[in-house]
Image (cartoon, grey):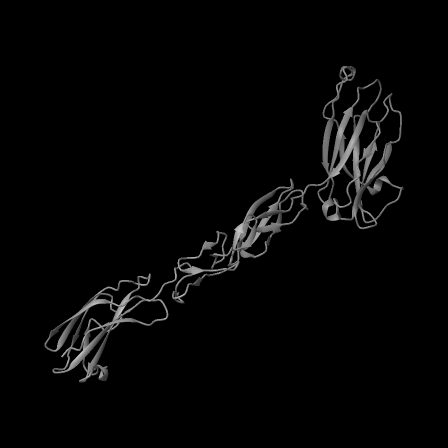
C-alpha cells in the first residue's frame, strides 16, 4: 500500500500563496495496469491565502476506471489532508493526515469503450477542511486501484467584490461550509448610511439577501454605483438617491455640488421657503382704492395688485393717519378708532374704519405684502377724508 503526499498548498517564503506539487506517481505496475502520470497545476501566488483555504475543494477530474483483469483489484483510492503552519519537508507519516474520503469512480468503462477509442472521464469533488493554518498537504493513498487519476485541481469559492444599494462589499470567502456569512458593506464616496448595509455570502460564492442601503449626500446624485456632484444649474438639498433637480424659476447656480440655487437680482426667497420654491418678489400696490363715508365711519375698498410677486400668501394692511391743515402734518390715528375686521393681515379687499372724530381729516394707506423679503410694502393711499 503506497501513501503518497501529492501536493502542498499554502504561502511561500515571500508572503505569496502557491500550490506546490509533485509531478507524478511512482510507476508501479499493478495487475497489468500502469498508473497514469499525475500533474498538479501551479496556482498564481496572489490567488490563494490562508483565509482562502477555508472551504477549499479538491476537484479530481478524469477519474478513469480501467477494465478489470483477473485477480483482486481495488476500484477506489483514499484522499487525505494535513493542515500545517510550515513546510514538512519530504518525510510523511499516515498518522499525520486526516482522511477526507474514499474516492470511487461513478461509471466503469469496458474493453469495448477502449477499443472504440471512446474517452470517458469521471469527476469527483470533495471539500477540504476544516483548515485553520497557513497551508495544507494533500495525499492520495494507493490501495491497488484499477483507476487512472488524470488531473487534480484545488480551488475555493468566493463571493466577488460588488456594489449594491451604493454600498461596496469586498471579496469574501465563506468560512463555514454549512452556513451563510454575514458581511457588512461600506458606503461609497459622498454617501451615508440610511440603514447599515449587509449581505450574506453563500458557500456557492453567491451574494444573497441585501439589507439596508446608503444615500447620496446633499449636493450629490446617484449615477450607476457612485454618488456624483450635481452639475451647474442643478441642486439637491436633501440626501437621497434621486437625480438632482433643476434650479426653480428666477434662481441659478454656477457651481457643482450645490445644495440650493441663489435668487436672481430683485428676487428673493424667505427663510421658510423650501429650496424647490421659485424665487419671488414683493407685490405691486393695490389698485382702485375708493372710500365711502358714513358719519363717523368709512368703508374702504380696493382691487388686487396687478403683480402678486409670484406668491399666493398676499395680505393687506390699513394704516390710518389723522391730518392737519396740510397733508404733511399727518400723524398716526390714536384713541378708540376701530378696524373691521382688523387693521393687518387682511385677506380680502374691504375694511371698515369706525369711531372716527367729526370735523377731522383722515388719510388711509392700503399696503400689499407677501412672504418675499425684504418685507417692505407697496402702498396705495386715499386722499384726506373730512
Q: Nearer the viewer, residue 72 or 228?
A: 228
The quarter of the picture where residue 47 lies is top right
Q: Position of residue 170 (x, y in %)?
A: 65, 49
Q: Nearer the viewer, residue 244 or 182?
A: 244
**Quadrant (top left, top right, bottom left, bottom right) of the N terminus:** top right
Count how many numbered circles sit on residues in the image: 0
Q: Is residue 157 above or below residue 227?
A: above
Q: In the figure, is residue 270 to the left or right of 78? A: left
The quarter of the picture where residue 331 lies is bottom left
Q: Residue at x 89, y 27 (%)?
A: 28
**Quadrant (top left, top right, bottom left, bottom right) of the C terminus:** bottom left
Q: Position of residue 19 (x, y in %)?
A: 80, 41
Q: Position of residue 195 (x, y in %)?
A: 53, 55
Q: Residue at x 14, y 74 (%)?
A: 298
Q: Position of residue 27 (x, y in %)?
A: 89, 28
Q: Nearer the viewer, residue 122 or 338?
A: 338
Q: Residue at x 71, y 42 (%)?
A: 55
Q: In the figure, is residue 261 to the left or right of 97? A: left
Q: Is residue 2 above or below residue 205?
A: above
Q: Is residue 191 above or below residue 7?
A: below
Amino acid at each position: 500500500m503506497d501513501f503518497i503526499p501529492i501536493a502542498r498548498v499554502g504561502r511561500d517564503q515571500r508572503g505569496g500563496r502557491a500550490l506546490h506539487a509533485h509531478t507524478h506517481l511512482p510507476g508501479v505496475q499493478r495487475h497489468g495496469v500502469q498508473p497514469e502520470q499525475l500533474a498538479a497545476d501551479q496556482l498564481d501566488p496572489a490567488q490563494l491565502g490562508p483565509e482562502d483555504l477555508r472551504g477549499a475543494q479538491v476537484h479530481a477530474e478524469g477519474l478513469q476506471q480501467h477494465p478489470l483483469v483477473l485477480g483482486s483489484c481495488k476500484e477506489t483510492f483514499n484522499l487525505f489532508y494535513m493542515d500545517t503552519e510550515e513546510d514538512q519537508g519530504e518525510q510523511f507519516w499516515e498518522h499525520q493526515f486526516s482522511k477526507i474520503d474514499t474516492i470511487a469512480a461513478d461509471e466503469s468503462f469496458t474493453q469495448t469503450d477502449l477499443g472504440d477509442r471512446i474517452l470517458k472521464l469521471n469527476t469527483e469533488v470533495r471539500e477540504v477542511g476544516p483548515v485553520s493554518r497557513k497551508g495544507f498537504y494533500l495525499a492520495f493513498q494507493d490501495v491497488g486501484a484499477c483507476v487512472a487519476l488524470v488531473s487534480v485541481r484545488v480551488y475555493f469559492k468566493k463571493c466577488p467584490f460588488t456594489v449594491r444599494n451604493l454600498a461596496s462589499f469586498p471579496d469574501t470567502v465563506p468560512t463555514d461550509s454549512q452556513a451563510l456569512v454575514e458581511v457588512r458593506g461600506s458606503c461609497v464616496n459622498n454617501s451615508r448610511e440610511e440603514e447599515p448595509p449587509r449581505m450574506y455570502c453563500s458557500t456557492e460564492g453567491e451574494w444573497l439577501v441585501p439589507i439596508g442601503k446608503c444615500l447620496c449626500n446633499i449636493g450629490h446624485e446617484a449615477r450607476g454605483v457612485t454618488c456624483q456632484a450635481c452639475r451647474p444649474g442643478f441642486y439637491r438639498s436633501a440626501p437621497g438617491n434621486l437625480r438632482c433637480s433643476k434650479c426653480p424659476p428666477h434662481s441659478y447656480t454656477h457651481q457643482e455640488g450645490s445644495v440650493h440655487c441663489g435668487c436672481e437680482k430683485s428676487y428673493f426667497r424667505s427663510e421658510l421657503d423650501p429650496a424647490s420654491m421659485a424665487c419671488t418678489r414683493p407685490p405691486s400696490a393695490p389698485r382702485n382704492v375708493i372710500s365711502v363715508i358714513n358719519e363717523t365711519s368709512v368703508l374702504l375698498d380696493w382691487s388686487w395688485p396687478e403683480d402678486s410677486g409670484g406668491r399666493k400668501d398676499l395680505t393687506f394692511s390699513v394704516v390710518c393717519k389723522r391730518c392737519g391743515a396740510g397733508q404733511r402734518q399727518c400723524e398716526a390715528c390714536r384713541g378708540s378708532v376701530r378696524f373691521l375686521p382688523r387693521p393687518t393681515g387682511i385677506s380680502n379687499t374691504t375694511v371698515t374704519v369706525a369711531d372716527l372724530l367729526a370735523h377731522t381729516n383722515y388719510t388711509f394707506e392700503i399696503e400689499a405684502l407677501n412672504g418675499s423679503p425684504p418685507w417692505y410694502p407697496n402702498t396705495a393711499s386715499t386722499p384726506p377724508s373730512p
